[in-house]
Amino acid sequence: MASGMISAQHFEAGARSFAELWKTCTDAQQLWTWHDSGNALDAGYLQLDGVPVSSSAASGAEARLAGGEDEAVPWQPQYTHLYNYSIAFQPSYSVPILLFSGRKLDGAPLSWEDTLRDLPAASRATATSGDARWTFITQQEHPVTRAAMHSIHPCETATLMSLLLAQDADAGPTTARQDTVDSHLQRDAEPSWEGGHTAERLLQCHPKHGVAGGRSDELRYLCGWYSIVAPVVGLAVSFKLWTSRAEAGNGAG
Amino acid sequence: MAHQLLQFQQLQSTVDVAFWAELGRLKLDTLRLSEDAQPITGFYSASNSSDYPASLTLDGQSLESQAPHRKGLHSIPGSLLNVNTFERFKAAQEQASQHLQKASQQIWQDILSGRAQEDPGRLLNFLLLSYADLKHFRYYYWFAFPVLKPPEPFRCKTLASLEEGLGADLAASTAQACAGWLGGISPASASEQGAAPVWLIRVADTGVRCQPLSTWQELQGLDGRVILGIADHGNLPGNPGWLLRNSLLLAAVRFGVTELEVACIRLRRAQPCVQRSLLLSVTLPHKSEGDWASFMPTPTGWELNARGKLGPRMMNLGPSMDPRQLAESAVDLNLKLMRWRAAPALDTARLAATKCLLLGAGTLGCAVARVLLGWGIRHITFVDSGRVAYSNPVRQSLYEFKDCLEGGQPKAEAAAEALRRIFPSVQASGLQFSIPMPGHPLSDAEIPKAEADAKQLDSLMEEHDVTFLLMDTRESRWLPTLLGAAKNKLVINAALGFDSFLVLRHGAGPSGPHHSANPREKADPAGMRLGCYFCNDVVAPLDSTVDRTLEQQCTVARPGLAGIAGSLAVEVCCGALQHPQGVRAPAAQHDAAASSATGHKDAVLPLGPVPHMIRGQLGGGFAQQCLVGSAFRQCTACSWAVVEQYRQQGWKFILEALQDPHALEDLTGLTELHNAAAALMMDASEEEEDENDSLLKGNDQTSAAAGDDWTEL
Ligand SMILES: [Zn+2]
């Protein structure tokens, strides 16, 4: 993992614990759930379905009676788009990959332009430009379901993760990680391979602080990775991901 | 009446892409032209989000004859009326009210007969009109969720959340009982279709229990409250969902009550949520059994479209289903990826908009076309007069054995056809004609054809941005070289010997009689006009038999050579297209933009500096050299004198040159040069010790004449 990569087995273990941890961190309706691949070759994946995103597109349509019938609730224009997200293992890069696809309420898939409009402003600006070293958004087949989806291109993920793990070690246990990650994103730093050994140390670190203590390496990897990629596509990251304890079997939300 | 009119939230449809894909398959394999109604299954759950209602979903399993029960989803029976043409769809739309009437009649019969009470899914029976334009991946459709209007509207006495309506404790045990019902745990609810979406909740001293709708009559006379439970798709805090309407009518008809408690169960994270579920007390219209039997309820229920109007919807799935569009966007994406990874300033749009004319569809033409496709170039025109021969397919990558049959397909059209097979979105065409060549005498009868060909070439070069000279004779390059200079357009030249090649981009057209720099004057090399293929010649292009290492023996070139030279030709072309100076881009060696600061250079020259010419040898140890040469003032193809003559006289001048190439020599002053040649030769050997070996030296050296044209560079 010091190389920023993760094996398929560690991915599965990490992803399953992540899903358990996630339940304790959010009160959202939708939850990350683990799906087996259904074949012996591929790792399974996490899926988060039907997350509503209010579309910024507005029209002049107004509420009106449904077909002139007064026993129906007046019709309202709807701007909700629903997104499915998936976290799968990318075997050629040995890293997790976050995929997503959006649709309208009637089921029509969103065009790339619509999808782009739904992205956070910062991602929208860099999604397709050459400046987006880490966060280039591209079209990608889901490694397991083969569905056409969008994703953050995986080819810089390992570098980013090795940086993050190293940075983590330097910063020490009490520093907010998101800050250090952000500064990396802004500087678009050249890959640094230093500090790999300290990253290893970090991965076994600080149970005494009670922060993210007692976690497996895989779960820490998944949480770190998720904290960076999720905001790029507009998914919220709960701070609880770093503060709450992972307790397997605690499914209450 | 003091009680409020009860308003219901409309049910919405969601159609997954997989449903349309499946319908397309079903139509092609089974239905064909049949327009008979097909049974289909819709799915919904009471899963609640505050932002939007749950909807009735059709997906890949909706067309299965026995749609499997799926955990957490209610299966709703429906009827699909798929028609074959858009006109038929319009007609079906006109008859919408008859269709709805028929569907709701069935529901009404099922209510009266008690069948709906046994099988409440029948209350929700839906209708789908559709037309699948499979060619364009457009799907026109219109759902109806038929409801029967009661003789008087349903009214609401009270409405609250389940928690408020029942109190926290009772709400919790009700939610628990409903969870058992919906989860299929309670044996009474388990069926092949999963839990029925409408059921009864009995609240007694012994606890809360859920039971089938059919047990209403048994429960009468027993103690406790009986509440009608429904899996509710709605999300509004003050309104129940659409599906409750027929259930209320059933209650009015079958239960004969005028007041009914209803629990609209809504789920969060797959569990009934006491805050979001509703508890209502509803007043129902009353009639005697006989009066109900003769009552004819008015149906309603066509879904509104995205603009809130009564009418069909259309889903265009071209971008996600049309393989052609998928290929197109994948190719675009690949170029974007290249920009992201390696060349941030690459202008892919510019490449996509570039129109390329390929003169010659042989080994070089095939190689060039394929690499152009790789760069995202979408517009390619071939010109070739030949037909595909049996020896061609093994060397010329766009042809196959079958192209050789029946005397051989015309090469240009066969090559264009191959490009369309490789990438259907390409705009490729092929034209069969020969390019008029100087020194190939024309009979009077041939002149009109030659004139037409020359004019066609002129207009083709006008329409295209880049012309590639990929022919197998030297003379045929003369006219397009001249036209390129006259039009100041980018011309890329590639020529093969047995084991050597030359790739060259012609410079800009001449801007005046004295523009072309004399190499001896050591003018600013960055500003010099680059030479053309003929600039090194001191004789006019002739149909000569002099020995040449290039072109003449093209058919015996080493087979790998065309791929190498063709690829280099395209890379030179794209480099020049991405260069801010385009056709005037200085040769790589003299390009100031290339020597500026690193970061800056990438921004200015996304693909780096571009050489003027590349010469390669496989025989001599696989060496490759980049050379540069200035335009020759007396060039028979690109000099001011020649270009001016063409501009003034057009075809007349061309014809003259075709008939007598020596006229070109007279025009450009080469004849004079020849006369002086012998004298010059005497002292030329000592003079030309230029420090810059790559500079073209041959311009005024007669020793270069008529021999291996470029070996003297
Ligand atoms: Zn020339």
Image (cartoon, helix red, strand yellow):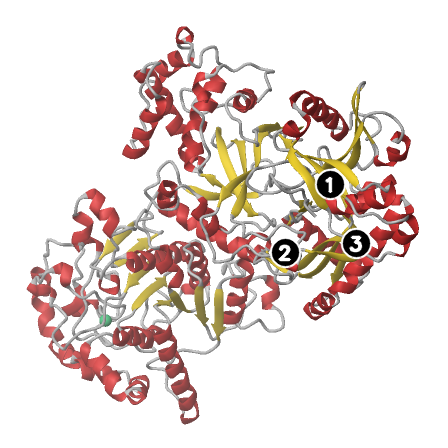
Q: Secondary structure at mark 1?
A: strand
The residue beneath circle 1 is: B282
| Disc 3 residue crowd, few under 14, some 14–19, many 20+, Cα 10 Å | some
Seen at 11% across and 77% down, the residue is B676
Relative height, residue A27 to residue B87 (above, below) = above
Beta carbon at label 2 within 8 Å of ligand 1: no
Q: Which picture quadrant has residue B248? A: top right
Kind of residue sitting beneath label 2: Ala
Image quadrant in which the N terminus of chain A is located: top left
Q: Is residue B542 left or right of residue A66?
A: left
Quadrant hosting ligand 1: bottom left
Seen at 44% across and 69% down, the residue is B381
For this rendering, which residue is in front, B246 or A253? Answer: B246
Q: Residue B434 appears at what percent x and percent y?
A: 43, 78
| Disc 2 residue crowd, few under 14, some 14–19, many 20+, Cα 10 Å | many
Q: Residue B67 appears at what percent x and percent y?
A: 78, 42
Q: Is residue B317 left or right of residue B498?
A: right
Q: Are marks 2 and 1 in contact (CB under 8 Å)?
A: no
Distance CA(mark 3)–CA(mark 2): 19 Å
Report the label total: 3
Q: Are marks 2 and 1 on the same chain?
A: no
* Mark 2 vs mark 1: in front: 1
Label drawn at residue B151: 3
Kind of residue sitting beneath label 1: Val
Q: Is residue B1 left or right of residue B706?
A: right
The residue beneath circle 2 is: A66
Q: Residue B620 appears at what percent x and percent y?
A: 32, 50
Kind of residue sitting beneath label 3: Pro
| Disc 1 residue crowd, few under 14, some 14–19, many 20+, Cα 10 Å | many
